[in-house]
Image (cartoon, rainbow, N blue to C red):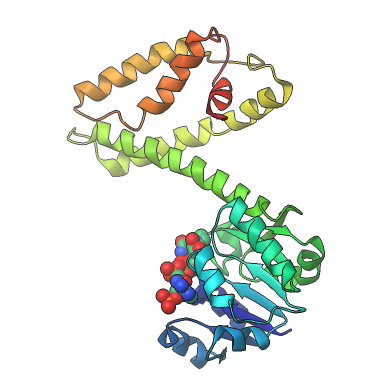
């Protein structure tokens, strides 16, 4: 297996170490060459240029900062007959454009979205995994090597789908972090220890997360009132208490207000008997 990895940042170095530990001969390249030295000591072959590294591998994995750095790094590389796997975070449109770009240069292409942070790489019990999309044949043929750092999940033949899944999950996580930040701000300054409050937050968010199944079912059926336990009219009423509490606690409600405004708009449009699925419609441009 001729394997090449471009990019030895925090994530790239973690990927490299799992392949080396699993016994894969590995050629690496990094723009700042000093970052490759520890990997060389661990058995990697270090290439002087990205083009040289690409020439040394049939399967070429790229894990760089962003899509622009991928274009720069691969500008002079001959990709004819290569299998190119791009694990650099980007948008779905960037992934689709990069897939066409790679195909024009004679390579098969997979885009990847890494659902893990570096310490989770090479640790199967961490739950980390990578979404892949693009060439199914490439995914199937290279699955064993791709699955060494983290479990590999195929997200579809559309090369944009790995990035779409990745970004959708990260966006949901961002909303969760916003809620967690607001909750900690509310209890700050009170006789409540954040460490004692944290397990309550985790348990509550875990209990509420399956609401995603209810919303999914409503979006698919088109009936946003289906199985609603807490309706929008009640929730909008409750939002007033959340906002008043924020004011009493001298906490800015700026993280909550945009979502609450959308809920209020949907209610004003006459959908008080729905849950929050209708907000998806308001967001869709
Ligand atoms: N680290 C994480 O937690 C996340 C987890 C989810 C996936 N991301 C994405 O993985 C990509 C790489 O992330 P990283 O953590 O390795 O990032 P850095 O440690 O900042 O390393 C960046 C590497 O990119 C090289 N680089 C930057 N610009 C260029 C360029 N114009 N040409 C060639 N290489 C470039 C940089 O090289 P150097 O600064 O050492 O010379 C590093 O190798 C990323 O898409 C995350 O979103 C990680």
Is 10 situated left or right of 19 in this image? left
Residue found at x 76% / y 65%: 139
In this view, which residue lies farthest toward the top?
270
The residue at the point 31 percent across, 31 percent down is 254
Horizontal and vertical percent position of residue 113:
60, 58
Relative to 100, 208 lies left or right:
left
Residue 171 vertical placement versus 144 (above, below): above
Observer able to see residue 147: no
Quadrant for the N terminus in the image: bottom right
Disc count in the image? 0
Query: Which residue is at 55% across, 64% downward?
Result: 88
Q: Is residue 64 above or below residue 231?
A: below
Give how far across and how far down residue 255 sits, in percent. Answer: 35, 33
Apparent side of residue 106 relative to residue 167 in the rendered image (left or right): right
> Is 10 drawn above or below residue 157 in the view shown?
below
Who's the residue at 32% across and 16% down the image?
241
Split into 4 quadrants, where in the image is the C terminus?
A: top right
- Frontmost residue, 219 versus 23: 219
State the residue in front, 207 or 47.
47
Q: Is residue 45 placed above or below 6 in the rendered structure?
A: below
Residue 273 visible here: yes
Residue 278 position, x and y percent, is: 57, 20
Q: Nearer the viewer, residue 252 or 32?
A: 32
Residue 220 x/y as whole percent: 72, 26
């Amino acid at each position: 297996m001729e394997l090449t990895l471009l990019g030895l940042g925090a994530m790239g170095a973690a990927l490299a170490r799992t392949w080396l530990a699993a016994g894969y001969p590995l050629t690496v390249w990094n723009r700042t060459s000093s970052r490759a030295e520890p990997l060389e000591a661990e058995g990697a072959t270090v290439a002087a240029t990205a083009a040289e590294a690409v020439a040394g591998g049939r399967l070429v994995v790229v894990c760089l900062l962003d899509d622009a750095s991928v274009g720069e790094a691969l500008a002079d590389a001959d990709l004819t007959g290569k299998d190119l796997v791009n694990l650099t975070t980007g948008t779905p449109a960037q992934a689709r454009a990069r897939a066409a770009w790679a195909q024009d240069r004679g390579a098969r292409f997979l885009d990847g979205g890494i659902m893990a942070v570096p310490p989770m790489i090479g640790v199967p019990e961490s739950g980390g995994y990578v979404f892949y999309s693009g060439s199914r044949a490439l995914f199937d043929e290279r699955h064993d090597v791709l699955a060494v750092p983290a479990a590999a999940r195929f997200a579809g033949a559309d090369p944009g789908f790995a990035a779409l899944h990745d970004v959708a999950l990260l966006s949901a996580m961002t909303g969760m972090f916003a809620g967690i930040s607001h909750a900690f701000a509310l209890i700050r300054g009170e006789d409540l220890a954040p460490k004692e409050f944290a397990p309550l937050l985790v348990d509550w968010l875990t209990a509420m997360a399956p609401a995603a199944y209810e919303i999914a079912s409503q979006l698919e059926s088109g009936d946003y009132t289906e199985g609603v336990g807490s309706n929008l009219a009640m929730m909008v009423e409750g939002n007033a208490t959340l906002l008043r509490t924020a004011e009493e606690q001298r906490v800015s409600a700026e993280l909550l207000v945009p979502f609450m405004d959308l809920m209020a708009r949907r209610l004003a449009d006459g959908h008080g008997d729905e849950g929050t699925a209708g907000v998806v419609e308001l967001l869709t441009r």
